[in-house]
């Protein structure tokens, strides 16, 4: 939530920061701003609304400078407004700050400073950082930052500039991500890699309570004792085009279309790359139970995995949303494996769930897309998906990569437990390897889904049903639709409808029905008939033979595959269905209202 960027170098910071903010907009987009530091102190431009609004303001009020900080906001404390936007500047215009995170003790600090005569202008928690820094400032910026970080409680990634040191940019973080980029023309701080990718693929990952001091010439790192810290620079493998739309109208469509390749890459990494080595190290025999915990779509991937793991491993698998897991006093111990799934690796609840699991002695395995993220570093082992940067707020390719990683884990673990022979495992792996090609086949038929979706824009409510694995993937179809099209939707286990929800079915209600689990074909068909006989329309996804019920049932077939892995195919249809409905409604698909991609607050 919220994206920050800072630049100091020999080029104009303003266009660099605006461009970087565009790459971070997925983290929040209710207001944005930037500050540059010149000989006369700070010049700040900030504006409620999308970045376009900030760009318009910048045309009216041009800024330039060789050092600056910028921010794109997802409001937590204080409504989206010009005054609540970042950067925040202390009342003497000496210190400017951009902040990603939440300061939990801001009220107490605010009252303390008010008693000292400081006047606050915004309702944000972040303004206290700028005001407190200014209050503490005593000629030495780095000492001020140390003092500041000791006083702040909560989470923060901060970019700080001081008018008395216009040639220095300071960063510090706790529980929120921050990278430091090193390029030929200058140095960067940023919440995420895509913001700097155009300029450099050389980055440092800042650790909690480390302080980075950037100048145009170099970067130095310190701990809070002001001792120098030596850090290793990392080379990012993502290419700059990965963070561009590449001719597609939306990142979401581009990312859907990228899936055959990213699935191939993910499978290759987990079968013969570094991921394979990591998987080999895990002795599944040590564990008596598996818990999977995650948020949103990543949680839905966990729901699918539960069915696959239980079928192949015959071990009890529990799936829990991370926001519940962290507070429920989970029954786990040294014999438990806790699997955490996250695209960003920075989701606050998932990180807290991992820490809780570790505290209880469980073994933690994370499946993460962003290299160097908190989850990847803190979990006992981490398996990376190879989805590349995902920019659209609604996940597609990262979700698919998570599913594939979970399938491969399940097969490896089943072999480890002696539940699958090497020959059986080979057959399953062959099926998993066939997924990218089959996904590509579905993507070639995109017109069929597009046409069907175009006729669905008028629905006020859509239900998704399925049984077993199909129920699990129905939850993802429903989430995709509601988050980007703003159509109300619910996912139900097919057998559950008649216990209440069926009362909502009326003439022309749409019920998307997933039917890939062979032994349950008759059951899900009878659930579909129950809604058809009450006037519903059905989109039937799967290969089971059925009637068209006088044109009220439309069937979309899938390439044949071992049914355990069918969710990887049906989800492609569900993603396209949601995408084209939202596109036909003319919505801002990549940045749905109220949402942000990286949820670093509770
Ligand atoms: C939905 C979506 C979210 C994320 C969730 C977890 O399309 O993207 O539900 O799946 O916020 O995020 P990560 O995977 O970064 O932990």
Image (spheres, helix red, strand yellow):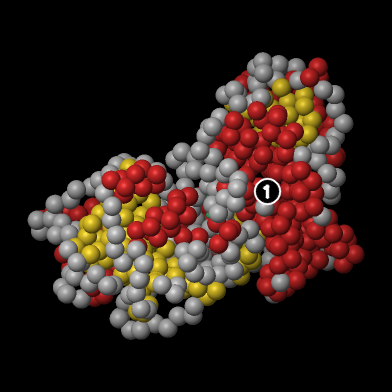
| Front-most of residues 479 and 534 | 479
Q: Residue furthest right?
A: 423
Horizontal and vertical percent position of residue 557: 81, 37
Q: Is residue 105 visible?
A: no
* Residue 45 appears in the figure: yes
Residue 590 x, y percent position in the rendering = 53, 44
Please tell me in which quadrant of the rendered image residue 218 appears. Answer: bottom left
- Please tell me which residue lies in front, 371 or 507: 371
Give left or right: position of 403 versus 150: right
Q: In the figure, is residue 22 to the left or right of 245?
A: left
Mark 1 lies on a secondary structure that is: helix
Depth check: give the residue in front, 41 or 373. 41
Residue at 87% in and 59% down: 427
Residue at screen point 55% across, 70% down: 236
In x, y percent, where is residue 498? 69, 25
Residue indicated by mark 1: 257
- Which one is in front, 447 or 352? 447
């Amino acid at each position: 939530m919220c994206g920050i960027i800072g630049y100091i170098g020999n080029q104009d910071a303003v266009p660099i920061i605006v461009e970087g903010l565009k790459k971070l907009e997925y983290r929040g987009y209710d207001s944005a701003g930037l500050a540059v530091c010149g000989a006369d102190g700070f010049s700040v431009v900030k504006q409620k609304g999308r970045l376009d609004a900030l760009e318009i303001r910048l045309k009216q009020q041009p800024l330039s400078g060789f050092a600056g900080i910028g921010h794109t906001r997802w409001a937590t404390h204080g409504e989206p407004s010009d005054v609540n936007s970042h950067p925040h500047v202390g009342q003497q215009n000496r210190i400017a700050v951009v902040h990603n995170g939440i300061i939990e003790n801001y009220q107490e600090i605010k009252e303390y400073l008010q008693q000292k005569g400081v006047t606050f202008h915004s309702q944000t928690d972040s303004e206290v950082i700028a005001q407190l820094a200014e209050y503490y400032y005593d000629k030495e910026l780095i000492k001020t930052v140390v003092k500041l970080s000791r006083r702040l409680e909560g989470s923060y990634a901060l970019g700080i500039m001081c008018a008395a040191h216009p040639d220095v940019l300071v960063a510090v973080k706790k529980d929120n991500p921050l990278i430091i980029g090193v390029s030929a023309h200058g140095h960067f701080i940023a919440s995420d890699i895509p913001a700097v990718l155009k300029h450099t693929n050389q980055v440092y990952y800042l650790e909690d309570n480390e302080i980075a001091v950037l100048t145009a010439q170099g970067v130095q790192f310190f701990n809070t004792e002001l001792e120098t810290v030596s850090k290793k620079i990392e080379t990012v493998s993502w290419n700059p085009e990965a963070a561009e739309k590449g001719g597609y109208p939306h990142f979401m469509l581009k990312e859907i279309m990228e899936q055959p390749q990213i699935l191939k890459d993910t499978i290759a990494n987990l079968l013969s790359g570094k991921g394979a080595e990591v998987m080999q190290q895990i002795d599944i025999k040590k564990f008596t139970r598996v818990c999977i915990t995650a948020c949103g779509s990543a949680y839905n991937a966990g729901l699918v995995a539960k069915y696959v793991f239980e079928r192949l491993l015959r071990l009890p698998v529990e799936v829990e949303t991370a926001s519940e897991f962290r507070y429920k006093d989970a029954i786990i111990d040294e014999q438990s494996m806790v699997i955490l799934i996250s695209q960003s690796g920075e989701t606050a609840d998932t990180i807290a769930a991992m820490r809780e699991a570790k505290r209880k002695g469980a073994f933690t395995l994370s499946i993460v897309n962003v290299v160097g993220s908190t989850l990847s570093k803190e979990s006992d082992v981490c398996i990376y998906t190879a989805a590349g940067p995902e920019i659209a707020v609604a996940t597609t390719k990262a979700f698919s990569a998570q599913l594939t990683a979970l399938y491969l884990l399940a097969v490896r673990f089943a072999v480890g437990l002696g539940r699958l022979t090497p020959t059986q495992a080979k057959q399953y792996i062959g099926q998993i390897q066939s997924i990218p090609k089959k996904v590509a086949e579905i993507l070639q038929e995109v017109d069929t889904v597009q046409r069907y979706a175009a006729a669905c824009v008028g629905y006020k409510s859509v239900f998704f049903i399925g049984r077993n694995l199909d129920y699990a993937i129905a939850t993802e179809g429903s989430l995709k639709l509601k988050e980007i099209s703003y159509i109300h939707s619910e996912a139900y286990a097919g057998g559950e409808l008649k216990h209440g929800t069926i009362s909502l079915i009326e003439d022309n209600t749409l019920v998307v029905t997933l039917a890939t689990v062979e032994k349950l074909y008759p059951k899900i068909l009878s659930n579909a008939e129950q809604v058809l006989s009450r006037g519903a329309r059905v989109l039937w996804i799967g290969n089971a033979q059925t009637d068209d019920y006088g044109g009220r049932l439309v069937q979309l077939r899938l390439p044949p595959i071992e049914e355990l892995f069918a969710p990887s195919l049906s989800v492609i249809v569900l993603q396209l269905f949601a995408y084209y409905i939202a596109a036909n409604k003319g919505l801002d698909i990549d940045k749905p209202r109220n949402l942000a991609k990286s949820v670093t607050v509770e």
